[in-house]
Amino acid sequence: MSNRRDFMGMALGGFTALGGIGALYAMKRTWDPLPSVKSAGFTTIDLKDYKENVLATEKWRGKPVFVLKQTKEMIEKAKKNGELKRLIKVNDDYYMVAVGLCTHLGCIPGYNPADESFLCACHGGMYDSTAMVTKAPPPRGLDIPPFKIDGTKLVLGETGPEYEKMLADGTTMKV
Amino acid sequence: MAHFDENAKPFSHQWLNERLAIDTLQRVLSTEYWIPKNINFLWAMGMVLAATFGILLISGIFLLMYYQPNTNLAFDSVNYTIMTEVGYGWLWRHIHGVGASVVFLIIYIHMFTGIYYGSYKRGRELIWISGMLLFVLFSAEAFSGYMLPWGQMSYWAGMVITNLFSGGSLHADGLVEWIRGDYVPAQAFLGRFFMLHVLLLPLVIIGAIVFHFGTLRIPHVNNQDGEEFDFDEAARLYKEGKKKESKVIPFNPVFLSKDVFVMGIYFIFFFYLVFYHFEFAMDPVNFDPADGLKTPAHIYPEWYFLWSYEILRPFSTNVGLIAFAIAQVIFFLLPFLDRSPNVAPASRRGKFKFWFWAMLIDMIVLTFMGKLPPEGAWSTIGLIAALVFFALWIALPIITKSEKKL
């Protein structure tokens, strides 16, 4: 008698647990980003359009992306600080392209062209012209979005060899 | 089978009694639910909270009829439709906004009353823990509701708070995107926080309120002296008509009449705010529609979250997150960190008296500093207050362990 009850209890419990796990999986998947959200994740920009030391803000996956064409002095400074690897080189020009969200908690830093630096008003973090962090609390420089160089055009959201190199040597985190 | 009188008129007292035991229910739940006599107006805060929750629910129902959970329509459905077109729509919105803010004021008073009188100790631990659970649920309810008008503060508070779940150096960006259902707060985010705010969280809150009441039943309500007495004996005296000698009063109508008096005063204050000072609960920045490409100059939470925000702020990302996480849960542990056997008001508990006032003042300082921009001296005071907060929690078991038994 007891064995039969145990068996029925375990059978009921087992099937209920199975159904429960299935339901949890369905719930998790329902909260996932939709395919339409995922597929809208590409933006193409033309680097010819930008002027030196004038910050442009593009939109990629709903996030602001900073594009800053570097002046000669900026390039010299970046070379000295070993941050040239943070820049994207197209022909002979260097561009800083980065997600414009503070790596601390995601506010948008403001650019001051006179100082050639960024300041985040939320918690006082600062970045230089290559978007490398110069003052805490941000733990790292602004993240560089996945990109693929196509002539003078840049496809944001696609992964090209230059971006893979940045990922591999730890210049940026995956975003 | 139970006995049913065939001659009982439908819906008469006898008819209902036979089917629902209404006399027993009334006795157990109100006329013979005993409350100590030795209490003051602070004991009314529970019913004040229950009434405020009721008002939030009713005003919310009316807002729900016109609110549109769509990123293109939400802002206008609140600021145009409800505020200018719907008859008395402004009233529901201002009641709801003021209520959401004031409910936290009363929660904090309710909490600190419990801490002062030791109402979390010796048999009352579950009252405290279920109350803290309600505090967390109300915080989630307030946050999800704050997203709905889809203004600048909604959007950026949503961005910053969901970013907390990346866990600093853990970089759980996938988790953040999963919570949002998008790379940034967008339609999927608004839709799910709308659901949480109007359905799931209120359901859980109602369940938790019932549980909170349930935890009170056996240990009974504490009193001003933390005195332990025989409730059965006191109840017997009361029922025998020796009301003067008895240490208890029934919940209904005696305790409730006192509650209603305190509620009367409270609602004068509440509706004064609703009609004349609703703006304190309406951040001007949130009257700009959400814009993912522009951060407001200062992002700060509503006043009731400022103390924990200020614990996050002065530290580097990882330390700040850990400090913030500890601050969110440490109050749950109060019944176990307080090692003293005494159930008594803080004023009679030696060093604990200073601990109580130091904690209260420290949280007020943290609240003020959280609102000020993180610059210069404010930054330093904020850091010191955050360190004092943790020092007090570390000191608590030590100073209560050495407390003399009263």
Image: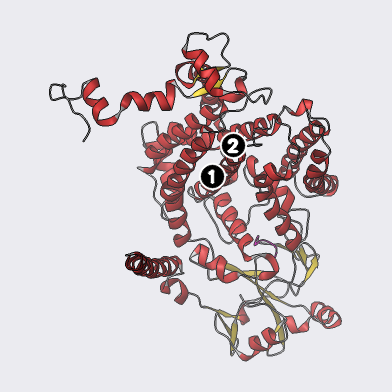
Q: Crowding at label 1, few (<14), some or many (≥20) Cα neighbours within 10 Å?
A: some
Question: Is any part of residue B262 visible from this angle?
Answer: no
Up-down relation of residue A9 to residue B90 (above or below):
below
Q: Which residue is mark 2?
A: B104
> Percent position (x, y) of residue B252?
45, 19
- Chain letter for mark 1: B
The quadrant in which the C terminus of chain B is found is top right
Which residue is located at x 62 percent, y 40 percent? B125
Q: Which of B381/B322 is in front?
A: B322
> Percent position (x, y) of residue B278?
55, 31
**Residue type (three-letter) at the residue carrying disc 1:** Ala
Q: Which residues are magenta?
A: A103-107
- Chain letter for mark 2: B
Q: Which of B207/B18 is in front?
A: B18
Q: Quadrant of residue A92?
A: bottom right
The quadrant in which the N terminus of chain B is found is top left
Please, which colouring scheme is shown? secondary structure
Cα separation between marks 1 and 2: 9 Å
**Residue type (three-letter) at the residue carrying disc 2:** Phe
Question: Is any part of residue B120 visible from this angle?
Answer: yes
Which residue is located at x 67 percent, y 33 percent? B112
> Percent position (x, y) of residue B107?
59, 35
Q: Is residue B393 left or right of residue B159?
A: right
Q: Is residue B290 left or right of residue B117?
A: left
User: Of helix, strand and loop, which one carries label 2?
Assistant: helix
First in residue order: circle 1 vs circle 2: 2
Q: Which residue is mark 1?
A: B142
Residue situated furthest left in the rendering: B7
Assess whether mark 2 and mark 1 are in contact (beta carbons under 8 angstroms).
yes
